[in-house]
Image (cartoon, rainbow, N blue to C red):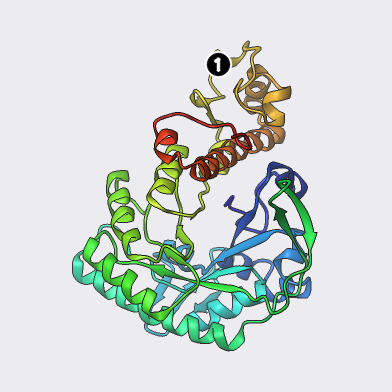
Amino acid sequence: MPVGTLATVKGVPQDMLEELGVQILLGNTYHLYLRPGVEQVRKFGGLHGFMSWPRSILTDSGGFQVFSLSELRKVTEEGVTFRSHLDGSAHLFSPESAMEAQIGLGADIIMAFDECTEYPADRTRMRQSMELTLRWAARSKKHFEEHKYEVPWKSEKLEPRTGNWIMAPTPPGATQSLFGIVQGGMDLALRKESAERTVEIGFPGYAIGGLSVGESRKVTREVVESTIQHLPTDKPRYLMGVGTPEEIVEYSNLGIDMMDCVLPTRAARHGLLFTSEGKVSIKQARYASDHGPLDANCHCRVCARYSRAYLRHLYASNEVLAQVLNTVHNLTYYLDEMRSVRHSIELGKRASFLSGERPIPGTA
C-alpha cells in the first residue's frame, strides 16, 4: 500500500496512481484529524470523495504517530493526551475517539487503537503495553460495532477475466472493516500471547505492529516469523511499516498479505531509486552523461522516456519534477514486485521466486 499520509501520495495525482495499478492507499488519521479535520472530510463523503479515489483506502489509528511525539504526549488508561505538532493545541486520542475519527474519514479498512511499544524496553514494560493494547482493542471493537455504517460510495473492482478495473456499486450492506493489532515488543512469548488474545476478541483481519522502531532487521524477521504462526490463515495478515523490495518478497513468502511503507516515496524524494540491478543514487555525478534509461528492465513511463542524465539534472537542479518522476518509478518497481509475488503464488512457485527467478506479471 503506497502511503498517502495527508490524502495524497506526494507528487503523484490519483489518475496516475490508477494507471500504475495501485489497489489500495493508506491514509494517516493523526494528520488528517489535525488538518483538514474529520468533519471537513466527512462533508465530501469521506476520503474517497474528498481525494477523488474510487479504490480502497486503509487508515491507521494514529497510535504510531502519537507514539512518535514522545515529548508531547501522556498515556493513560483512557487514551493518549498529546499536543499538535502544528500549533501546540491539546487533544485526546482514545479507542473511542480514534474509531470515531476513522469512521468519519470513511476508509474501507480501519485499525484498532494501540500503543506502540518503544525499543528497547524491558519485559515488564512490554507486557504493560501489550495489556493496554488488548484492552484498547476490545474498546475499539465495541465502539466500532455500535457506530459503523454502510459504505455510501461506488467503487472500482478488479475484473479477474480481463485484469481491468471497472466501476461497480458497493454491495448492499457493505461496511467498513476493523483490524486488530498485535503488539508485545520484541518478546516472542508476549507476541504469541498478544496474537492469541487479539484473535479471541475477533476481527476480520490482523496486523503486526510495533516493528521497524529501531530493532535490527534480523530481529524484525524473527518477530514476524514467530507471530504469524498464531494468526488465522483465512484472514488478511498485515505487517505495518515495512519494507525494502527484498523484505516484502521475504515477508510475502512467510504468509504476510498486506504491507505499507514510506520507503519507495521517501527514498524517491532523496534521489534513491530501486532498479532490477540494485539501488541507484541518481544524485551521483557519474550519471551526468549517462544516456541509458534508469532501468532497462522497467516498463514505467519514466524509464521509457527519460535518461539517467536527465533525471540526475532534475535532481541536481532541485526541480519538483525530479520528485514526481522518481516517485512514479519507485512505486512502479514496488508494485511490479508485488504483482510478481502474486503471480508466483498462483503458479505455486514461491521458492523459485525467492531464488531470483522472476516471472513476468500476467504471463504463465
Q: Which residue is more in the foreground, 77 or 273? A: 273
Figure disc tally? 1
- Foreground: 216 or 118? 216
- The picture places residue 114, in percent across and down from the top left corner, at 42, 72
Disc 1 crowd, CA 10 A, few/some/many (<14, 14-19, 20+): few
x and y, in percent, of residue 133 in the image? 37, 75
Q: Is residue 293 left or right of residue 94?
A: right
Q: Identify which residue is drawn at 74% across, 43% down.
A: 19
Looking at the image, the residue that sits furthest to the bottom is 146
User: Residue 364 occupies which quadrant of the picture?
Assistant: top right
Judge whether 251 appears above or below 353 on screen: below
In the image, residue 32 lies at what x, y percent? 63, 66
Q: Is residue 334 above or below residue 311?
A: below
Element assignment for label 1: helix
Relative to residue 79, is residue 45 drawn left or right? right
Q: Residue furthest left?
A: 123
Q: In the image, 238: left or right of 319?
A: left
Give coordinates of residue 137: x percent, y percent.
Answer: 42, 78
Mark 1 = which residue? 285
**What kind of residue is marked 1?**
Ala
Residue 175 appears in view: yes
Q: Is residue 210 above or below residue 252?
A: below
Q: Residue at x 58, y 16 (%)?
A: 287
Q: Could you say which quadrant of the image residue 145 lies in?
A: bottom right
* Image point (67%, 75%), residue name: 174
**Does residue 94 appear anywhere in the picture?**
no
